[in-house]
Image: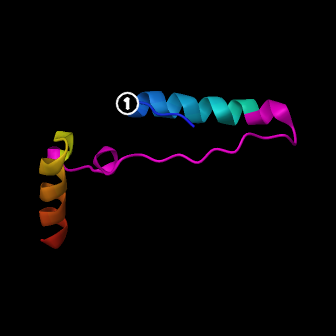
Amino acid sequence: MFLTPRQSQHRIVVDTVRRINELRGEQKITLVDMIGQSGMCVEPFAGNRGASFSLMCSKHRQE
């Protein structure tokens, strides 16, 4: 399990596990990764954190 504050760091971990698995043969490391909703959002308000992002995202989806 790992937690990273930045998507770039998250990507490094995922890529590293994939490279390790290429070398390990049959004993592979299982990886399940998640990115927060604001990290996947392409809208300009995605930089907002907490409740403000949730409210803006909810309103945007409704519209």
Residue 5 vs 52, above or below: the answer is above
Q: Position of residue 49 (x, y in %)?
A: 19, 41
Label 1 neighbourhood size at 10 Å, few (<14), some (14-19), many (20+)? few
Count of number-bearing discs: 1
Q: Nearer the viewer, residue 59 or 15?
A: 59
At x 42% / y 29%, what residue is drawn?
Answer: 8
At x 12% / y 56%, what residue is drawn?
Answer: 56
Q: Is residue 35 magenta?
A: yes
Where, quadrant-wise, is the C terminus in this rendering?
A: bottom left
> What secondary structure is found at the residue carrying circle 1?
loop
Residue that mark 1 sits on = 6
Give the side of residue 34 with respect to residue 56, left or right: right
Residue 55 vs 26, above or below: the answer is below
Q: Amino acid at mark 1?
A: Arg
Magenta part, dominant SS? loop
Where, quadrant-wise, is the N terminus in this rendering?
A: top right
At x 70% / y 31%, what residue is drawn?
Answer: 19
Q: Position of residue 23 (x, y in %)?
A: 81, 30
At x 73% / y 40%, what residue is drawn?
Answer: 29
Image: magenta residue range? 21-45
Give the side of residue 12 with respect to residue 16, left or right: left
Q: Nearer the viewer, residue 14 or 51?
A: 51
Residue extending furthest toward the right: 26
